[in-house]
Amino acid sequence: MAKPLTLSRTSVMLLLNTLSQFGCILLFVYVAENHPPFPHSEKVYDRDFFFLLTAMLFAASAFTLTKNKPTSPSAPPSAPPDSSILNRDQTEEWKGWMQYILYYICPLHTFFFFMVYAIMYIAKGINHNKFLLRVKLLALAFAIFVVWDLNNPLFSAAHFFLTKDPAIGATGGVLWEWYFRTTLDHWSTFLGMIFAANYPITSLWMEKVEALPAKQQWLAKGAVGGLLAAAFGWWVTGPFMNPKLEYNMTNAYYGFIPLLAYIYFRNVHPTLRSYSLELLHVIGKTTLETYLLQHHIWLTSNAKSLLTIIPGWSKCNMFLVTIVYFLVSRKVYAHTMYLRGMLLPDDLGFCLRSLGAIGAAVLFCCIIASFAATGGIWGIYTVGFLGLLLGFAADHAISDALRKREGGGGEGAVEGAKQTESAPTGTAAMRSLSVGGAAIGLMLAGHVYTSGVASHLQPLPMACKNSAAVGKWVVVDECQEPIRDVAYHDSGVAAFAGCGTFKSWGWDVQPPSSGCRFARRSRKELGNVLGGGRRVLFIGDSEVRNTFYGLAKLLGGEVPTGGEGEELKHTDVAIDVGTTHLQFVWAPLASDLGSKLDAEFAEGGKGADAVIAGGGLWDCLHNHDKLDEYEKEMHALDTRLKNLKLRGVGVVWMTPPSIQDERLVGEEKQTLMTEESVETWRESQRTILDSSDEFDLFLETEKITLGVAGESLDGVHYPERVYDVLVQIIAQSFDWALPDRELLELAAFKPNQPGKMANAGLGFAMLMLCAVGLFTFDGYMGFAWLGSLVTGGPDPRGMWEEAFEVLHKKIGVPVVERERKEGGGGGVRE
């Protein structure tokens, strides 16, 4: 940690140097998030790979097993290691492995820190009283129970300043997100307070147990361990196995069980307490930095995507990004510690002045940023230019101030005079020219870089419509190890009979600067886009109908199958999925398309937010000698669709699929619906409809189906997975076809209300458990006390005076006289 800042040139320049490096790191974070070299890639969960990496981390950590440092920093190297329960080395190790296992939520830490500080500050005179402190803590427990475990308006009233509107990272509303996050762990901090209040007693209890003969010692430890192991086993096989949403509702009440079990068994023997894993210890020191940066380097786009430096090599990319991530995290840790020592030393007056200066600097930057954003000139160029300009101005002002200060008299005056005399003429002008040149150079470099790279994750622009269906079918080897492992664990399949027989369609790689980051849309993502009461109209022939069913299935709707599906073959079908309304209108002929589309959008009609239309097969089959009439109908349809687009309706057209002549069923189709015949009608559609830029997507279905021509069922229709591909292509177009979806979602948004996760029964049980932990003086929440009852071992209830005696003498608290009981039972009396 650095020395406090002084007004000497060395100290000030060291501060500026550290701030400059810190600023460069923040610039890198900004570029990684908003201007990555390649589009951010999708997150993919590989269960086997995850556990492999976790196992490798622990295996590597095992080779760094290190004896703990002595309790006192001034102790000689030969001094025994710190073997106290939850010693500093052990807690740093714990933080290290939790950073991969669990997330730290900084605002929650801050919130609950203030809760702890406030309750300990109120009536702080009783904090060293044996029972009054526990009464005060029990009152806090009751307040937690009332606010979080009872369904009442207290939480909303206390957080009146939080909006209910959705925001980035808080799609359910800011108030609900804060309620949800605090509710997940609303008992955790208080349980930690109980452990802290009982910590000296728990440590003394362990000492007394370990002073017993071996048989009695392990009988006492075994009793407590057995109880905790039983509780842990119940948690693993019970609450932990619940689905995520169900588990969330109970985490606050059961989540402490594995933590207590870990603490106990990690500290059950002096040898275990005397050693720690250095690798995890090192990682644990930077958990705050790794938590903050993982959302901008390791993960991006609010943890929805991954930073990509080596596209196409996902595991190599992960390796490289992880190295960069940890190096940057450690650098940020070093700089924050350095800046903390310089600006926030152990001097209250100095700290207050520093905080005032830091606050003024941050406020100034916020004002500049606000003006830039309001003027629409915000971006990497503005950031770079303003950074250089302000940096140069600050450097110039500080340098002048230091020269004047050093020239004030004494030795400083002599040194300043020498520097002034030795300075060449025009130094200031040269510095200005140098800074100006550097600014221009960096601006040009920034322009060259940003013009060829990707941007942050955002809706696809309309310019992507010409490449939304550009891709190919590729052979997927289902015998690859990850697929085999999933099949083995999930389906009990030992081996596949064939390999490399499955085809999957994918988008071609697009230039990073195009902004066309095509990706498969999940049910949740599509639900967000099409929710809020949106209506999607599919109108056309059987190809459009099958695509309609594909979207309905993806959204989770019930699709008619078998005989029911056959009965609905040539009829209209409506499927509602949540707040999304899907409608298919049977209109196989061009004339049907026009009239039925008019009916849907006539006054009193239902209308739609998006229209997916298609046809041509029936016209080719039944009106094969009426191409001129078909083209007239298509021109009229083109006008109708353009008008819909002008009204803000998304419009997608689907051409007929690739026809496989040899698989056509029936003499009429084999004669009139051949690929050559259908191509004539397709060409009319291209000429009349594709020439219009108003459409959101002109989907040439034949190009998609041509790659799986051999899989056609009857020469015209294809397996369901082919229509799933068409749905995914159409789903990309919703990004630009439905540009006002955020406004619609906001208008239809109904926020969840705090209190939804309240559970009075479990909350009351936690209140009772807290009372047990407090008044049995047991950091293990009564488990050690129960163990002592079963085995007759040391009772933590009688150890308060002895456990706190040294501390109370040290801080001047009156020590209660006590008398040891005979027999080493650990009990005392006043």
Image: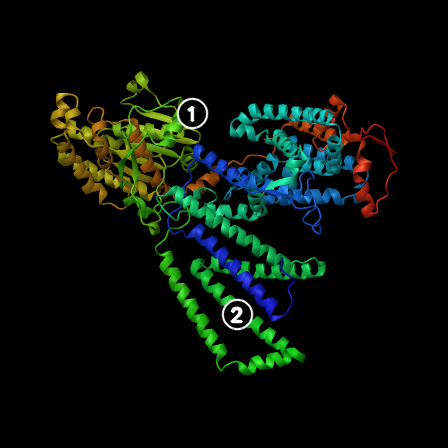
Q: Residues within 10 Å of mark 1 (few under 14, many from 20)?
A: few
User: Identity of the amino acid at label 2?
Assistant: Ala
Q: Which mark is residue 102?
A: none
* Apparent side of residue 452 relative to residue 659 in the rendered image (left or right): right
In the image, what residue occupies the spot 57% across and 59% down?
362
Q: CA distance from mark 1 to mark 2?
A: 63 Å
* Apparent side of residue 757 relative to residue 431 in the rendered image (left or right): right
* Residue 135 place in picture, x, y as percent: 78, 35
Kindly identify which residue carries mark 2.
393
Q: Is residue 193 visible?
A: yes
* Residue 56 place in picture, x, y as percent: 48, 38
Quadrant position of the C terminus in the picture: top right
User: Identity of the amino acid at label 1?
Assistant: His
Name the one closer to the observer, 788 or 76.
Answer: 76
Kindly identify which residue carries mark 1.
489
Nearest to the eye among marks 1 and 2: give it.
1
In the image, what residue occupies the spot 57% across and 38% down?
176
Question: SS for tag 2?
Answer: helix
Quadrant position of the N terminus in the picture: bottom right
Name the one closer to the observer, 20 or 135.
Answer: 20
Q: Residues within 10 Å of mark 2 (few under 14, many from 20)?
A: few
Name the one closer to the observer, 738 or 826.
Answer: 826
Q: Which of the 4 quarters of the picture holds residue 535?
A: top left
In the image, what residue occupies the spot 58% across and 34% down?
753
Q: Is residue 566 above or below residue 317?
A: above
Q: Which of the 4 quarters of the picture holds residue 127?
A: top right
Question: SS for tag 1?
Answer: helix
Of mark 1 and mark 2, the one earlier in the sequence is 2
